[in-house]
Amino acid sequence: MTNIAEKLAAQQKEISIAEFFEKNKQILGFDSPTKALITAVKEGVDNSLDACEEARILPDIYVEITETTRGEFKIIIEDNGPGIVKRQIANVFGRLLYGSRFHAIRQSRGQQGIGISAVVMYGQLTTGKAAFVISKTAHQEVAHYAKLLINIKRNRPDILEEDFKVWEGKEHGTRFEITVSGRYVAGKQSVLEYLRATAIVNPHVNITFKDPTGGIINLHRVSEDLPKETIEAKPHPEGIELGQFMNMGKASQHRKLTAFLVNEFSRVSPRVAKEICNKAGVPESRSPKRMSLEEGRAIQKAIAQVKIMAPKTDCLTPIGEVLIRKGMRNVLEGLKPGYYSPPVTREPKVYSGHPFQVEVGIVYGGQLPRDQPVEILRFGNRVPLLYQQGSDVITKAIAGVDWRRYGLEQRGGKGIPYGPAIIMVHVASTQIPFTSEAKDAIANMTPIREEIERALRLCARKLKTHLGKKAKRAKTQEKFDIVQILIPEIAEKAASIVGKPVPKLGKTVTSIMNVIWIDDKLEYDKKRHKGEIHIYNYMAVKRKLNVHTILPANSLDKKKINPEPSEIKGDKITWKLKGIPSTEMFTISFELTGLDKNELGDIEIYISDINPTHVIGAEPLPGDWDLDERGQHSLLAFDDANGEEYEDDIEDDDDENGMDYDEATEMIEDEATEVISNEE
Amino acid sequence: MKNEERHHKAVEELYKIADDIYNQIEKGQIPKMQIPLRSKKNIQFAPRKGVWKYGSLKGVRSAKKMKGAYMLLRTMYMLEFMKDMVANQKSSTLREMYYISEGWGNAKFGSQDESNNLAEDLEIVTACMREDFKLRPEEDGARVIGNITLEETNRKGEKKRINLRDDVGDSGYGIPYNVETDKINLIDCDAKFIMAVETGGMFDRLVENGFDEDYGAVVVHLKGQPARSTRRFMKRLNEEMNLPLVVFTDCDPWSFRIFSSIAYGAIKTAHISEYLATPTAMYCGITSTDILNYDLPTDKLSQQDVRALKAELTDPRFKDRFWRDEIELMLKLGTKAEQQALAKYGLDFVTDKYLPEKLTEIGIL
């Protein structure tokens, strides 16, 4: 026995992290040559973006890929970030698990600090070539560069060459060059797709990409606003893992357990800290340094039983509805979609102690392909997720929504729907639960999945409202044709046959239409949005109604609203219309200033004080409207169950005796195609 | 009724339709027209006449819907057109009317089927025949050979006596679109039965083989689904000359429909079934049973065929045992056969063996 143990001990040597990763490339995202190339670009760009944003600099990113020899690519990523001080360059690029963000509880792209050094290592393993880094901070006169490799056994950088260097025309920034073996492809999972997707969720970024053929693709910045600065937050006790908890205890400066809990965790008051200790049966005065594993476990258990306020959510920076719309328009316009559904940014929620926030945008119709599964764009903390779509919580949430009610095809109401749509989902969190270190997919956590489903439904409902409006308009258009063209002609002919004067048509016309028809027009000219709402009364009697619309109050030109609104409350404007006579039209007009063209899409029109089934082109005002104190408009107020009560078709009528005369479908064709018809 | 009177009545009826529409609009209603539903759901057996007629189900054509509004407008145009034809003593073919409708703006038809159908609708609503509106079908060239003598009034107004065996060539006598007594009088006949044949090939085969003379048959070429005049002509032969009518077609779902429109009345023309259908007509073949008994070469049923057969299973006209069994057998075999399949056993097989056997079976010979 001893012999064997000795033997084994002789074989066991310390396995360095670097060595471990060398043997497990796939968990870092280097499992195929194609993916390796994307991962390398992705890690570099993520780093650049994080650095720029932390330094509050609008990012200008340059990416270049050239094929040096067959199967070997040189990647250059250059940013205008704050730069890296000389002594840190080697550590950042040449040491795995080295980073500033590892212990910080905040939303950022890189979370583990594995990324860029893993790229260096991958390059060196596959090509033997060293990484080249040049960086300059604003304070330094000249830049500093280094050529480096990673000492795999020791997990330390081996610097081959370093020196100062003049970097012409560069205020500050970092340029990183690495040669890796890989494969460059175009299409769905490609570097370009990754960059395009990045531009969607980062509308404040300028990206220039030079591909191996020398082609240059520019993805322009469409927003000058940097994302809100992320605030570092202390960890929430509910999300903490035992090991991490013990480590924090060991590192703590506090002498008492209660003080440790109160000061190093968020949402723990002295009262809560006491309660935790009592529940766990651990003395309040226990030094966190000396806490035993058993005690730690007991405390963790107690944490789950004590009521603790949900974590603060202000450490999250969602993209926001306006910027998602801008970003999607900027990147997806080339696909010529028909409609950008107003995006949805949900309120932050919490899963096992970590705050997270879900955002959804849907693009529909136009020239998007109709007979294919919808395209899914997944993002975690503004980083596109290109691989492992099947195991991602976003995919699962999409598959869990019944899309048939929103106008997409879906067999059995489950699975990825088919139709002309692109669905974008962004999950922001201080701790995104990825399924692996490669950060390809977000794990299927129930609270996250449910929240994504809610956001999807909300966004889809907006889409459906839009489509419904379009369909209703088409139907009404048809009725217009009937009453404006066909009925007059029928009347004229009938009158001519019977030799009588042409009868008056008003009543027939209103009986056919029997609706209030509302349409709107929005034009953008000389930095002004000019809007009109037309209300046609095609009912038999005079009708009064209230018309509401949602417009950004700050941009409204109060002098150019006609008629004077009855009420302006936040962004909601109300006109109480006294009564529009039968067969007459009424126009409301308004102007807005200081908005970008894309900032205003459809005009949302709501009606009240009238049976909504009589109205085409506007939705009933949600009953709980005024409860939505944020003044935030529209469907957030509906939430899930309501909202659809008035969606019944206005078509109450159809044929009086329920029998439609349709020879084409009803008749057994005596003259079917196969028999030569002779009769006539 | 004399011709003049019939046209006069037709115009009156057309006026009533227009007047009804006019009054509805004047009252502020949505104009609409009611028409018996022309589907297999709405045909029922009229025992006294022995044919299938429309039932009481009505369809509404209302201007509330796009399609209905277009149809009403077309109706108005067609009424006016017919009224003018009667007034000007002109007539036109259905095809001519379809082309004239090209100039009707919004009331223009999409296809001739549409205009033909509307003309039939007007027949139904007014209880007149389209000839009363001065509309006629194109000559269709259905042919007859057999020992029958008739008197036809030609376009010069002369009465010509024609023997349909001796006075015609091999292609037989062409049935005109008007076979009423003002045009055709049946004089004499020395035949035992009418043999209505679906395809031209088989018609020629029977003629070449001298089937008409050998068996006392009047051979009629149906040319697929027979035109009204062909059906009317056979009915007159059947009633006035006491000739039993035997139908000989391919073995496929469409041929069954040919037989049913001859014997029971077609769905499209159920309003005049008693005038066109020959309730005593007999089906001699080819049946699916024949395919088995005579071991005939077959083709596979197409998807359309199968659909047509299934539709026939819910068609009240095919409700009897014989048809049900044949349809179900055809579905089971999954095959169909042409009349020409009999040529497997030689060109004379059909006249020497098949038809004599089948006609004996149904009691004609």
Image (cartoon, coloured by chain):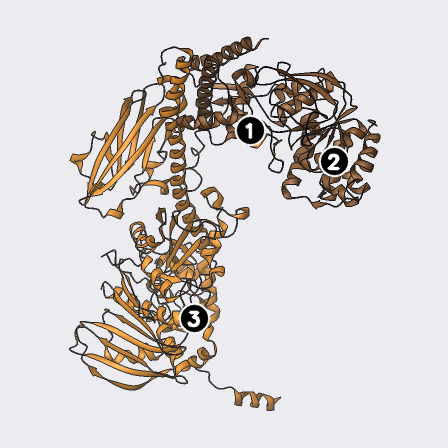
Chain colours: A orange, B brown
State the SS at label 3: helix
Q: Mark 1 lies on which chain?
A: A
Residue placed under numbered mark 3 in the picture: A34
Type of amino acid at the residue the image marks with label 3: Thr
Residue placed under numbered mark 1 in the picture: A663
Q: In this view, does A223 lie to the left or right of A312?
A: left
Residue B42 in view of the camera: no
Residue shown at 33% from the left, 54% from the top: A334
Type of amino acid at the residue the image marks with label 2: Glu
Label 1, label 3: how many angstroms apart (C-alpha)? Answer: 59 Å
Q: Is residue B135 above or below residue A239?
A: above
Residue placed under numbered mark 2 in the picture: B208
Task: Give the camera-side residue of B199 and A486.
Answer: B199
Mark 2 neighbour density, 10 Å: few (under 14) some (14–19) many (20 or more): few
Locate residue A587, reporting x and y percent.
Answer: 25, 29
Type of amino acid at the residue the image marks with label 1: Glu
Task: Give the camera-side residue of B170 and B271.
Answer: B170
Which of pointers 1 and 3 lies earlier in the amino acid sequence?
3
Q: In this view, does A416 lie to the left or right of A485?
A: right
Quadrant for the N terminus of chain A in the image: bottom right
Quadrant for the C terminus of chain A in the image: top right
Q: Mark 3 lies on which chain?
A: A
Locate residue A289, reporting x and y percent.
Answer: 39, 73
Q: In this view, does A69 lie to the left or right of A532?
A: right
Residue shown at 29% from the left, 41% from the top: A631
